[in-house]
Image (cartoon, rainbow, N blue to C red):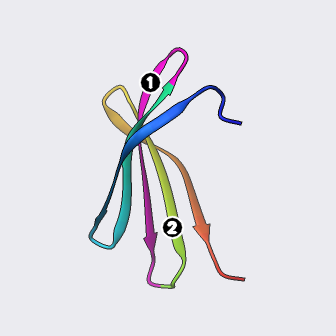
Amino acid sequence: MNKKMISRGKAIFENGKLILNGKTFFENGAQENRKTFEINKDGKLEDHFYRRSKGKWIEGHFILYTAE
């Protein structure tokens, strides 16, 4: 389910992190967002999501992926 939205942006790899910067377009506007992926010192994948609100980056979610 995409909630009638589309996202566009670019991906870069910098300092050991995959960084996705872009905008998500909704029916009523758009929002800047950033997502980073990094493998930490314990070998786990960290997923951070941020959105821009009133000129400041606000952390949205943090997910830690581990191997089972």
Which SS does the magenta portion mostly show?
A: strand
Q: Secondary structure at mark 1?
A: strand
In the rendered image, residue 33, in percent from the top left (x then y), is placed at 42, 40
Q: Residue at x 51, y 67 (%)?
A: 46
| For residue 31, above or below residue 59 | above
In the image, what residue occupies the spot 65% across and 34% down? 2
Q: Nearer the viewer, residue 57 or 24?
A: 24
- Assess whether residue 48 is covered by the magenta stretch: no
The image shows residue 57 at horizontal and vertical percentages of 37, 40
Quadrant for the C terminus, please.
Answer: bottom right
Residue numbers of the magenta segment: 26-41
In the picture, residue 38 is in which quadrant?
Answer: bottom left
- Residue under label 2: 46
Characterize the local packing of mark 1: few (<14), some (14-19) or many (20 or more) Cα atoms within 10 angstroms. few
Q: Quick check: 22 left or right of 29?
A: left
Query: Looking at the image, is mark 2 or mark 1 earlier in the sequence?
Result: 1
Can you tell which mark lies on residue 68?
none
Distance of label 2 from label 1 (alpha carbons): 26 Å
Q: Is residue 36 magenta?
A: yes
Q: Position of residue 40 (x, y in %)?
A: 45, 77
- Quarter of the image where one finds residue 67: bottom right
